[in-house]
């Protein structure tokens, strides 16, 4: 089942979220388990399975990183596991610098300023990588799909880094 076809939307990285949501609600209403309350157990089970599939498809398409991964997988791009190391040594070095920035926040003379600076850096670099990945997915060549795959892995790193930054901020100001 192709998720884009399921929601009757164009297969594209750029998704109209309101159209996706509208299609999702319509589909969920059509298979809602309450509509099958007086049917056989098998029909009820099928309705629950369809509802779960629709929900999974919706969650995938509404999230840009999951959507990118889905598109690349549908194109047959071999998605390496996140445990595999990058060949991009400059990014590995940059990862270490970003982690150091995160660790230094606690000991900064102005914690608020250090947090804001980390948020600014993480956001701007995330946005730049997102734009590159989007352009690569739109281009849809072997080379661009491979580049999009690498950028997707980098974006997942930034996503985790932002979660760590949020946790750090909560712990610093939770007193």
Image (cartoon, rainbow, N blue to C red):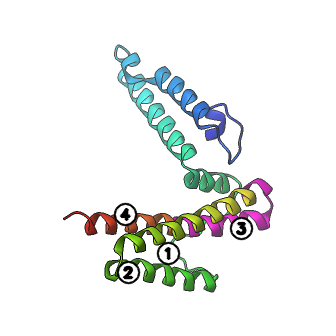
Does residue 106 sit above or below 61 in this rendering?
below
**Residue 148 lies in magenta, yes or no?**
yes
Residue at the image position 44 percent from the left and 80 percent from the top: 101
The numbered mark, 2 or 1, whose residue comes first in the sequence reads 1
Dot 2 falls on a residue whose secondary structure is helix
Disc number placed over residue 146 in the picture, else none: 3
Disc number placed over residue 166 in the picture, else none: 4
| Coordinates of residue 10 in the picture (x, y in percent) | 71, 37
Which residue is tagged 1? 83
- Look at the image and tell me whether residue 53 can be seen: yes
The numbered mark, 3 or 2, whose residue comes first in the sequence reads 2
Residue at the image position 55 percent from the left and 80 percent from the top: 85
Which residue is tagged 2? 103
Q: Is residue 55 left or right of residue 14?
A: left
Dot 4 falls on a residue whose secondary structure is helix
Q: Marks 3 and 2, Cα distance to the nearest angstrom?
A: 32 Å
| Residue closest to the eye, 164 or 30 | 164
């Amino acid at each position: 089942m192709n998720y884009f076809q399921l929601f009757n939307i164009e297969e594209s990285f750029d998704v109209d979220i309101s159209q996706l949501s509208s299609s999702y609600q319509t589909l969920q209403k059509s298979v809602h388990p309450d509509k099958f309350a007086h049917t056989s157990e098998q029909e009820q089970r099928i309705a629950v399975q369809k509802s779960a599939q629709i929900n999974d498809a919706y969650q995938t398409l509404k999230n840009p990183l999951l959507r990118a991964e889905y598109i690349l997988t549908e194109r047959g791009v071999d998605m390496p596991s996140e445990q595999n190391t990058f060949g991009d040594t400059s990014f590995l070095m940059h990862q270490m610098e970003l982690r150091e920035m995160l660790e230094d926040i606690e000991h900064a003379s102005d914690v608020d300023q250090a947090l804001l600076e980390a948020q600014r850096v993480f956001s701007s670099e995330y946005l730049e990588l997102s734009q590159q990945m989007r352009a690569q997915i739109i281009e849809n060549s072997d080379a661009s799909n491979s580049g999009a795959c690498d950028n997707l892995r980098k974006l997942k790193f930034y996503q985790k880094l932002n979660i760590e930054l949020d946790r750090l901020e909560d712990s610093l100001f939770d007193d």
